[in-house]
């Protein structure tokens, strides 16, 4: 006998204020600190978990630029410290090195392709497990209008998990310092079910995760347009 069905799991999450502190080290490098913010995640299956997120420390270095060809290349190093609340913090620090490549696809610089190749070393999700390495390259096709509208299609593949992530991102610049944005993402993942009953065929299935987020961004300070 074969049974097939659908199991839907929903969750809701919100967080604030989500502050990032950028400090310019040189004309080609910067340090970013992702400051603690309050987050709450609610699901029917596990209840509600709330508290502060872990802090992140990032260093970005521009290593190559070709303004005429519209090419920028750099590297981003990230350290995530387990500083959050017990319900949300990671069991140990994680580290990531991420080469970056930005290529303009037209002379007006309104269409671009952003490529990133993050390599991450993170603690095990379950207690007692060993740390793991992951490689999840990402391609982002971006369109920007002169009026401050942004549309981006993001594709990322995780080699360790064999999951393809697809995300659509849109943003609108209201003023030089204020922006509203929204994202819709999904992934398709194969799942194998271990059947404890003998002589029962192996079962398999697919998990389809969907997420929708809305956010607001406000820049405190000054930003300068990129020289063309």
Image (spheres, helix red, strand yellow):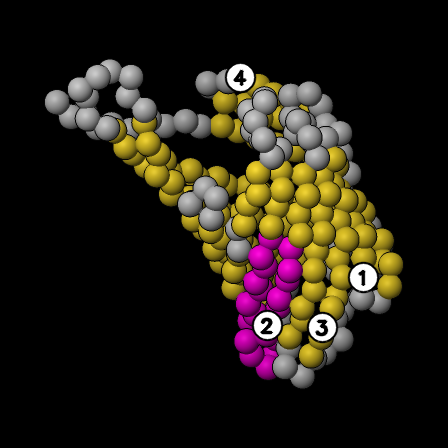
- Looking at the image, is 118 positioned above or below residue 143? above
Q: Answer with mark 4 or mark 2, whichever residue precedes in sequence.
A: 4
Q: Secondary structure at mark 3?
A: strand
Instruction: Compute the Cα span from label 1 to label 3.
Output: 12 Å
Tell me what residue is drawn at x 65 percent, y 33 percent: 15
Find out whether the residues at labels 1 and 2 contact each other: C-beta distance under 8 Å. Answer: no
Residue carrying label 1: 29
Residue 97 in view here: yes
> Magenta residues?
98-118
The image shows residue 72, relative to residue 107, as above or below, that is: above
Answer with mark 1 or mark 4, whichever residue precedes in sequence.
1
- State the mark number for residue 47: 4
Q: For this rendering, which residue is in front, 215 or 196? A: 196
Q: Look at the numbered disc 2 and give the secondary structure of its residue.
A: strand
Q: Which quarter of the figure is the C terminus placed in? A: bottom right
Q: Which mark is in front, 1 or 4?
A: 1
- Front: mark 3 or 2: 3
Give residue 162's position: percent from left, percent from top.
42, 45
Sequence-first disc among 1 and 2: 1
User: Does the magenta portion include 104?
Assistant: yes
Height in image: 175 above or below 181?
A: below
State the residue in front, 13 or 154.
154
Picture coordinates of residue 135, whole percent (x, y): 54, 50
Outermost residue toward the right in this view:
25
């Amino acid at each position: 006998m074969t049974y097939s069905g659908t199991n839907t799991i929903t969750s809701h999450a919100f967080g604030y204020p989500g502050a990032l502190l950028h400090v310019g080290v040189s004309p080609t490098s910067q340090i970013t600190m992702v400051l603690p913010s309050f987050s709450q995640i609610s699901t029917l299956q596990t209840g509600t978990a709330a508290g502060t997120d872990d802090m992140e420390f990032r260093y970005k270095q521009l290593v190559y630029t070709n303004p005429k060809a519209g090419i920028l290349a750099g590297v981003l190093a990230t350290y995530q410290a387990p500083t959050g609340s017990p319900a949300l913090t990671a069991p140990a620090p994680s580290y990531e090195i991420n080469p970056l490549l930005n290529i303009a696809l037209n002379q007006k610089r309104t269409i671009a392709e952003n490529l990133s190749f993050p390599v991450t070393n993170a603690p095990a999700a379950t207690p007692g497990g060993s740390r793991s390495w992951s490689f999840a390259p990402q391609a982002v096709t971006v369109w920007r209008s002169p009026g401050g509208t942004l549309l981006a299609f993001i594709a990322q593949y995780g080699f360790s998990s064999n999951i393809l992530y697809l995300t659509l991102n849109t943003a609108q610049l209201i003023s030089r310092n204020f922006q509203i944005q929204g994202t819709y993402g999904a992934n398709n993942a194969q799942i194998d079910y271990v059947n404890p009953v003998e002589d029962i065929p192996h079962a398999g299935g697919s998990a389809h995760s969907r997420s929708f987020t809305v956010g607001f961004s406000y820049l405190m300070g000054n930003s300068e347009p990129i020289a063309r």
